Amino acid sequence: MTNANQLLTEMDGFEGNNGVIILAATNRPESLDPALTRPGRFDRRVPVELPDLKGREAILKVHAAKIKTVPGIDYQKIARMASGASGAELANIVNEAALRAVRAGRKAADQADMEESIEVVIAGYQKKNAILTDKEKMIVSYHEIGHALVAAKQNHSAPVQKITIVPRTPGALGYTMQVDEGNHYLMSKEEIENKIATFTGGRAAEELIFGSVTTGASNDIEQATKLARAMITRYGMSDDFDMVALETVSNQYLGGDASLACSSETQTLIDRKVVELVKEQHAKALKILSENRRKLDELAKFLYESETITGEQFMEILERKDDAAANG
């Protein structure tokens, strides 16, 4: 408190016409003493949020100007792929692209370097010494295609950009990258339900094809549960609770700490509704995959053999008519 009083005293000592501007930064604005934020002191707040699509593109260009690049790099595409990245992460992407070009013996970074660098920053380096058994590789192939196929067969889902079963250093054995065409500020109830269904698509594919489940869906389970809980407690997307805030979020600039603001009986009911919601979307994913079993097999086989496929390759196979159907 002494330090705060000292700061207030010093700030009040400045005259309005002496040309001194005082700037301060914090990740916990909700914890500031109101005396600091009243008019005449820190009276103007400038939230520094994560950059939007246009901002990411501009930041990438600033950092790319410091390295050698080939002409014609599509920075807007890179910015779309790097959705949610901070300025520091975007700088890291460009630096990683430069390093990748040097390791390959080239003098300038190109589009492929930039795109691979996004994957390094998001998913980690390729784990070259990780050797999966044939069965594990096949399970991971079906798992990732399960995600992509469920996403592609639903409305309002971001297009699939890339699917890979190359293991990464943080422990991921594969991943499916979806990229929105532009900025996305609002999500409908249906869109969130579709995202939950997409998260469950990997496990659903394992169940459908192998009749068992693996530990590979741990992150999917966490993300699906988090979305389902937020729908009920924060977004008012439940008929049972309507527009009642059941959860509060603090420290939004430090990842956000959520805490329930309801009775233990209500918490039990929330848990039950979360389970029902995830199970409903899991069943939907299983139904989609069952109805598209032939394409699931074809795409999983192609991914197993290629290890990495692009969104264009995925959609070309998905939309291609079966030979039997064409001849019939």
Image (cartoon, rainbow, N blue to C red):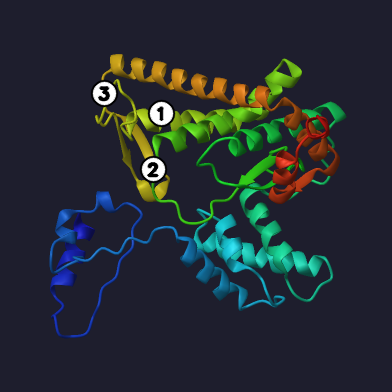
Q: Residue at x 39, y 46 (%)?
A: 186
Q: Within 10 Å of the Cα at label 2, are there few (<14), some (14-19), or many (20+) other Cα atoms?
A: few
Of residues 32 and 310, the one drawn nearer to the viewer in this rendering: 310
Which sits earlier in the primary sequence, circle 1 or circle 3? Answer: 1
* Residue 168, visible in the rendered structure: no
Would you call the spot at circle 1 few (<14 residues within 10 Å), some (14-19), or many (20 or more)? many
Q: Secondary structure at mark 2?
A: loop
The answer to whether residue 320 is seen in the rendering is yes
- Work out whether mark 2 precedes mark 1 in sequence or the reverse, and give the earlier one: 1
Say whether marks 3 and 2 touch (CB < 8 Å): no
Q: Nearer the viewer's eye, disc 2 or disc 1?
A: 1
What quarter of the picture does the N terminus occupy? bottom left
Name the residue rendered at 69%, 39% in the picture: 172
Q: Is residue 10 above or below residue 19?
A: above
- In this rendering, the count of numbered labels is 3
Q: Residue at x 14, y 58 (%)?
A: 35
User: Mark 3: which secondary structure?
Assistant: loop
What distance separates the C-alpha of mark 3 from that of mark 2?
19 Å
Q: Nearer the viewer, residue 230 or 27?
A: 230
What SS does tag 1 mark? Answer: helix
Left or right: 229 as drawn, with respect to 117: left
Instruction: Name the quadrant containing residue 273.
Output: top left
Residue 256, label in figure: 2
Comparing labels 1 and 3, the label whose residue is closer to the camera: 1
For the point 17% across and 67% down, the residue is 41
**Residue receiving disc 1:** 229
Q: Are marks 1 and 3 in contact (CB under 8 Å)?
A: no
- Give whichever of discs 3 and 2 has the lower sequence position: 2
Q: Residue 164 in the image: state x and y as whole percent.
A: 74, 43
